[in-house]
Amino acid sequence: MAIEITMPALSPTMEEGNLASWQVKVGDKVEPGDVIAEIETDKATMEVEAVDEGTIAEILVEAGTEGVKVNAVIALLAEEGEDPADVKGGSGKSEKAEPEKDLPDPDKAAARDDAKVSESSSDGGAGHGRPQPEASSNKTDGAKTAVADSIKAGPAPKKDGERIFSTPLARRVAQQKGIDLSAVTGTGPHGRIVMADVEKSKPAETTKAADTPKSAQSSASAAPMADDAVLKLFEEGSYELVKHDGMRKTIAKRLVQAKQTVPHFYLTRDVNIDALLKLRSQINKAAPMIKAEEGEKPAYKLSVNDMIIKAMAMALQAVPDANASWTEEAMVKHKHADVGVAVAIPGGLITPIIRKAEQKTLSTISNEMKDLARRARDRKLKPEEYQGGTTAVSNLGMFGIKHFSAVINPPHGTILAIGAGEKRPIVKDDAIAIATVMTVTLSVDHRAVDGALGAELLDAFHGLVENPMSMLV
């Protein structure tokens, strides 16, 4: 019996991915551990290994296909003694992945539901030539009449608080048209409201605005502009459309969610980094030389950012109540400081994590960070190397940015934004002096960390940076 090769879940939160390439072809024999494909998620490209022995009988999803759902069948493997030519179509336990083509990229699973309903309504259930179950073609006229009557009569109003099942695309279209989904009858699977249902409805048929809660009205008024409305503001031919990839969509989704659900507040402070720069120079000069492929090189080369990571980790240990994540049921108090570091990569950014940073030496942090950043730019990080973390550091100082505020990425409770170090006049012993100063801003989740606690954390960080020898003890 054929073995189904399915789209793997490369992380606990993964719902779909892009099938970047096949490393095998039909007729190839594979053994457990052989790399058979490369899967691209929003953050990384991962190799998929075979778990069974056999011959590739059929490839069901072509290389380059986007939006392949987790557990969708992507290929079939003929077992030993089985003729690959006889293996076609799979066992039927999992759906064959059907990539969406030419969709403007709403939720693809939702689009499939919408497409199916549109097909059945326009083609009388023919499904564009796809064979349908016999039962669907043998419905009685009485059943058809009953359905027609129920649609004509209109939907029964939903009770307050009752959940409305609808596709994301249907919700977006309804929001744009001002249609109340509680007054729409769903014809999708299990009564789910799909795009075709919304298109058949009219704003006049829905609940009057006077009866709509104020919160719903304000939500609708704050809806983003429709794509067509944005494009109409610009002269045709004066722009090009670049389709969002998975990373861009995930970044947009998570940051909007973060700003809408996480109550941010911000604490800013100037830090004198002269002592830190001096210590960094001394440590780098003392680095032993080691042999490498390109010849001898220093065993490590600390950056200012490496020392900031260490200082942030130690500050969280000094103020443990600030090393927390918010959940609806309880506060998650972390025992270690897992510090994420924002790394810019083509098309977006990713935040690889230095785990238990408070326990690591500066040289270890430096070398580990260089390796993570290199693999991040190559999109070769493993999910566990960029998911989670208790805080993060974002540094734009290398671009001359003096001050900025960063967005917290849940489950982090804080994120530290680092500005450029620059020569500034300061007051020292009642006299004007020149020092290298950088401005840092701590963004804080007010649900997890209160103002005074956040200030205590930033003060601990300030003390460690201005007295960096304490990071070596």
Image (cartoon, grey):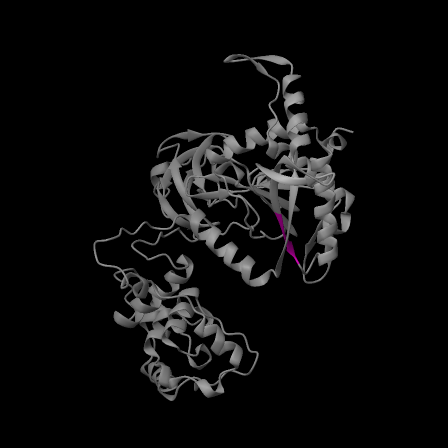
Q: What's the residue at 52%, 41% (across, down)?
A: 396
Indicate left or right for 202 with 443 as reference: left
Q: Is residue 262 visible?
A: yes
Q: Quadrant of the C terminus?
A: top right
Indicate left or right for 136 with 318 as reference: left
Write down the quadrant of residue 194 in the picture. bottom left
Up the image or down, 325 lies above or below 469; here it is below
**Percent coordinates x, y for residue 264 in the rendering:** 61, 58
**Percent coordinates x, y for residue 393 in the rendering:** 60, 42
**Percent coordinates x, y for residue 300 in the rendering:** 61, 21
Q: Main SS type for the magenta part? A: strand
Instruction: Check if residue 444 falls in the magenta segment.
Output: yes
**Percent coordinates x, y for residue 375 in the rendering:** 51, 32
Residue at the extreme left of the image, as rendered:
237
Instruction: Check if residue 353 falls in the magenta segment.
Output: no
Q: Quadrant of the N terminus?
A: top left
Of residues 40 and 471, the one drawn nearer to the viewer in this rendering: 471
Q: Which residues are magenta?
A: 441-445
